[in-house]
């Protein structure tokens, strides 16, 4: 990703292979992004967006031409397991006893992902769920209890206090 720094009358745009200086004297009051982009285009022959086309933008619809994937983060097993939704979208945990999957921290409406619940070598582990977890029919799932069994909960955060979740059990 390209970065820049503003001096008194020059914007130095770091292209990754060298700097490009763009005079910014006489800008006057704050300018719109399009006005600034036009000045950079005039000075460099390329718009910021076109120049930096490989960087995902958070304020524009995009089409990706390569696969996108998120890391599966391992949750710490314990009596209460609290996912931090700021760290990932996908999680896995091996249950070493009967557990409570607590309400996650850092929820953002629209976030979605999966949680893989793995039985340890003993099996017979159960899980209860925090109040934010909403399963169809208002019924929390019953885990597959075979040793080393894998179940999955897919979720989407609807609001700061509601996570719609779908349980699928007994994967290999």
Image (cartoon, rainbow, N blue to C red):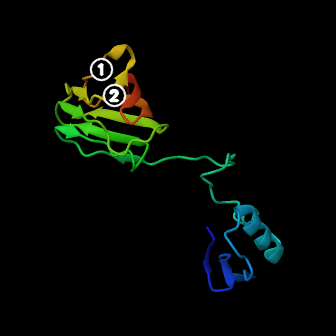
Taking the spot 23% from the left edge, 27% from the top edge, the residue there is 128
Residue 62 locus on image (x, y percent): 68, 47
Residue 68 locus on image (x, y percent): 58, 47
Q: Nearer the viewer, residue 5 or 115?
A: 5
Taking the spot 20% from the left edge, 32% from the top edge, the residue there is 99
On-image quarter of the C terminus: top left
Q: Which residue is mark 2?
A: 133
Residue 105 locus on image (x, y percent): 32, 44
- Mark 2 and mark 1: Cα distance apart in space: 8 Å
Quick check: marks 2 and 1 in contact, CB under 8 Å?
Answer: yes
Query: Please, which residue is most extreme toward the bottom here?
Result: 8
**Image vertical order of residue 105 relative to residue 47, above or below:** above
Q: Residues within 10 Å of mark 1 (few under 14, many from 20)?
A: some
Specify the label residue 140 is tagged with. Answer: 1
* Label located before the other in sequence (2 or 1): 2
Element on which disc 2 rests:
strand
Q: Nearer the viewer, residue 115 or 84?
A: 84
């Amino acid at each position: 990703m390209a970065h820049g720094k503003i001096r008194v009358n020059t914007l130095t745009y770091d292209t990754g292979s060298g700097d490009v200086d763009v005079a910014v004297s006489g800008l006057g009051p704050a300018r719109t992004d399009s006005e600034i982009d036009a000045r950079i285009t005039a000075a460099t022959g390329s718009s910021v967006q076109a120049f930096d086309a490989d960087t995902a933008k958070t304020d524009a619809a995009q089409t990706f031409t390569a696969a996108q994937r998120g890391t599966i983060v391992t949750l710490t097993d314990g009596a209460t397991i609290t996912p931090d939704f700021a760290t990932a979208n996908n999680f896995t945990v091996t249950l070493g006893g009967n557990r409570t999957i607590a309400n996650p921290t850092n929820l953002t409406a629209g976030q979605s992902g999966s949680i893989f619940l793995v039985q340890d070598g003993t099996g017979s582990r159960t899980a209860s769920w925090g109040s934010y977890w909403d399963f169809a029919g208002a019924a929390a799932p019953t885990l597959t209890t075979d040793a080393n069994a894998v179940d999955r909960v897919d979720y989407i955060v609807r609001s700061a206090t509601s996570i719609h979740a779908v349980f699928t059990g007994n994967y290999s």
